[in-house]
Image: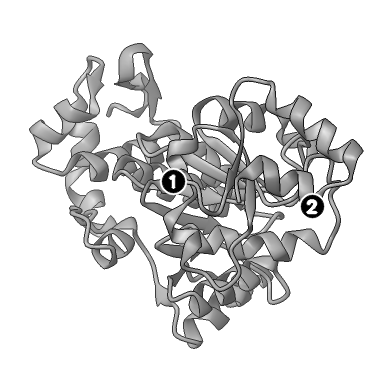
Amino acid sequence: MDAITHLRATLAPERFDNTLKWLEAPGHHVIALGDCEYPAMLREISDPPAVLYVTGRVELLNRRSFSIVGSRNASVQGARDAESFAHALSDAGLAVVSGMALGIDAAAHRGGLRGQGSSVAVIGTGADRIYPPKNRDLAHELAERGVIVSEFPVGTAPRPENFPQRNRLISGLSKGVLVVEAALESGSLITARFAAEQGRDVFAIPGSIHSPMSKGCHRLIKEGAKLVDGVGDILEELGLDYAPALPARLLAETGDPILDAMGGSPVSIDQLAQRTGVTAHAVASRVSLLQIEGRIASMSGGLFQRLQESIE
């Protein structure tokens, strides 16, 4: 059954008409389970949606993907970690999947959009809704350079029961799931459970034993999730090349090799990779972190400049 036939048979007439109007806009699509554009990874799960409502780059739904999820009440460091990991994974060619919530999800999308793999947002409302409203600018960017996908009909409001349901799609689209920060009652743990049931790898970043936002990650690690303290742990598990980051002690003793290789002129990721002998996506991961720390700045044309105040 094609998408339009399915919608005509399952939607109330008014909602069907509204969906047809929504489809008239550029970049809006409805994909049925039997269509070639339907994500192959989702076909593997036990209950794939019959149709998907999509805004943006449909082809990203069949790109090799990895999910990053976590707390809406993220710490500053947690948000930085999510964005840095997402940027590095995206530069390794992975589409970064998350749920467009505040906190860790939003940071993961920002990082994914900065890399070549881009980002996929799985939402718990109709594809015509932006929720939460604070992510309006992010949603527009995802619609233009990434993709937003929903299983819920156009016009569906944000209902609490929809978000746990959509979590199975976040994990279902992905080769694995990284939980950055999560309390014990976090919806991110629901995503991790779906991932385990679907045969996906589950990863978690440990944190302070005193932080409530670490307890969910620690529980996952106790239950068998892979402990992550660098993006190389994930890339290695997925069979992708990576260059391990230098230990903090060595960086303190010898200086940062990426900063040292930058000199005083704008340089590209590829130039830094050639100068240091480190893979491009490992360089991109470090550059992302240095940007967050305010030690380098992004220039036009994909170049980066070391900030004067960070030069000793």
Q: Is residue 263 among the parts visible in the rendering?
A: yes
Per the rendering, the mark at residue 26 is none
**Type of amino acid at the residue the image marks with label 2:** Thr
Residue at image coords 49%, 49%: 38
Image check: 151 left or right of 19? left
Residue 276, image quadrant: top left
Tell me which residue sits at (68%, 52%) in the image. 151
Q: Amino acid at mark 1?
A: Cys
168 displayed left or right of 198: right
Tell me if residue 15 comes above or below residue 226 in the rendering: above
Seen from the viewer's position, the closer of residues 291 and 70 is 70
Quadrant (top left/top right/bottom left/bottom right) for the C terminus: top left
Residue under circle 1? 36
Looking at the image, which is closer to me, 179 or 299? Answer: 179
Q: Secondary structure at mark 1?
A: loop
The residues bearing labels 2 and 1 have C-alpha atoms spaced at a distance of 22 Å
Question: Is residue 204 rendered to the left or right of residue 75?
Answer: left
Q: In the rendered view, would you say 178 is above or below 77?
A: below
Q: Position of residue 265 (x, y in %)?
A: 22, 14
Q: How many marks?
A: 2
Residue 224 falls left or right of residue 248: right
Element carrying mark 2:
helix
Residue linked to disc 2: 10
Residue 142: x and y, percent?
57, 32
Q: Earlier in the sequence, mark 2 or mark 1?
A: 2
Position in image of residue 155 (x %, y %): 84, 40
Disc 2 packing (10 Å; few <14; some 14–19; many ≥20): few
The residue that appears at 56% across and 49% down in the rendered structure is 79
Label 1, residues with CA under 10 Å away: few <14, some 14-19, many ≥20: few
Q: Quadrant of residue 87?
A: top left
